[in-house]
Amino acid sequence: MIAPNLTALRVRRAPALVPGDVVRIVATAHPGDARLDRGQAVLEQLGLVVQYGEHVYAGTRYLAGTDEQRLGDLNAAFRDPAVRAVIGARGGYGTQRIIDGLDIDAVRADPKVFVGFSDLTVLHSRLWRDARLVSFYGPLAAWTDERTGAASIASLRGALMTCDDIVLTRDPAEPSAAVRVDGTASGPLIGGNLTMIASDVGTGSLPELDGAILLFEDVNEAPYRYDRMLTQLIRSGALDRIAGVAVGQFTASAGTPSAAAVVAERLGTLGVPVLGGLRIGHGKGQLTVPIGAPATIDVAAGTLTVSAGVR
């Protein structure tokens, strides 16, 4: 695959969602389950009209149908002029298997809101790399109130339905809050799940990170795995010219030394500001942020400020 000339691509923002807009839930990885009922209720609470991709509940081993079926549902959503937002059903695994077939021309022709996280990181990366579409790293439609309660709903609404800047503040209770390198930095916010970012090295899907604020989080990873993934990114040269790092949640990570200690050591070699403790990822109170939008980290203030991802 020949990399596009990114300097020639204009940044695209989808229109802000309004009550009555149609959103389509699509499964690009694992199939949907009963949690989608609550996700639908949350979206309807915001005044949105919910549709489902044809194969959301299909089962082919651990996937929501065949690769052709999942890709077909994804492209159908981006091609349908009535659909104003595409929301991932579940994570798990499977989006990488279909990402090269994404209809980028359809994405460019009719920019839509896209929301998802975890395994869907590769889709955020492709949307930004090849279409310069700002997307949203936030909750999937498989919703649980215990993890994503009122604050998560308010954050999702603010990100998708207003043109306000988004400000996240360091939460000292988050394990990643111990990761800190003082300073300020600005650039487009790029990234997502660390496992998926590292998996993109060498595939052509990893966006250029020069001048960017790298965002990452992860779940169920031992500290040495954080070390390995960050080392892979460092050795590949992907982080040579990043502007800064925003660190989200380290969810269900156990071991000695801690994930925070390992990450702090690896990131400390980069010579850029690093802000941890952000409620982005798989943990409780997950917040929504635009991927690709201009962002600033101010480590002393403990804030990540991201420009609106919609217009």
Image (cartoon, helix red, strand yellow):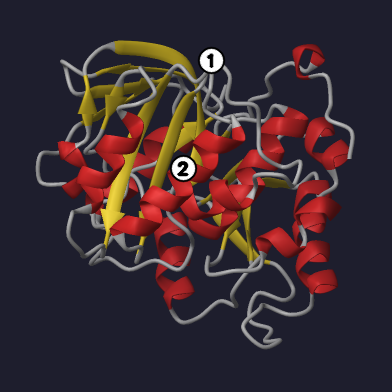
User: For the residues marked 2 and 1, what is the alpha-carbon distance in whole angstroms?
Assistant: 19 Å
Identified at 19% across, 32% down, the residue is 170
Closer mark to the observer between disc 2 and disc 1: 2
Label at residue 156: none
Identified at 55% across, 48% down, the residue is 198
Identified at 74% across, 80% down, the residue is 65
Q: Position of residue 205 (x, y in %)?
A: 72, 42
Q: How many marks?
A: 2
Please state which of residues 100 and 142 is positioned toward the viewer in this rendering: 100
Please state which of residues 301 and 116 is positioned toward the viewer in this rendering: 301
* In this view, 194 is above or below 169: below
Residue 112 appearing in the image: no
Which quadrant is home to the N terminus? top right
Identified at 50% across, 34% down, the residue is 234
* In this view, 215 is above or below 220: above
Q: Position of residue 7 (x, y in %)?
A: 76, 12
Residue 257 in the figure: left or right of residue 32: left
Label 2, secondary structure: give it: helix
Please state which of residues 179 and 128 is positioned toward the viewer in this rendering: 179
- Residue type marked 2: Thr
Badge 2 is on which residue? 231
- Residue type marked 1: Gly
Q: Give the mark, 2 or 1, whose residue is nearer the N terminus.
A: 1
Residue 209 appearing in the image: yes
Q: Position of residue 266 (x, y in %)?
A: 34, 36
Q: Residues within 10 Å of mark 1 (few under 14, many from 20)?
A: some
Q: Which quadrant holds residue 178? A: top left
Residue 307 in the figure: left or right of residue 55: left
Q: Are marks 2 and 1 in contact (CB under 8 Å)?
A: no
Badge 1 is on which residue? 211
Residue 181 in the figure: left or right of residue 116: left
Q: Position of residue 88 (x, y in %)?
A: 58, 59
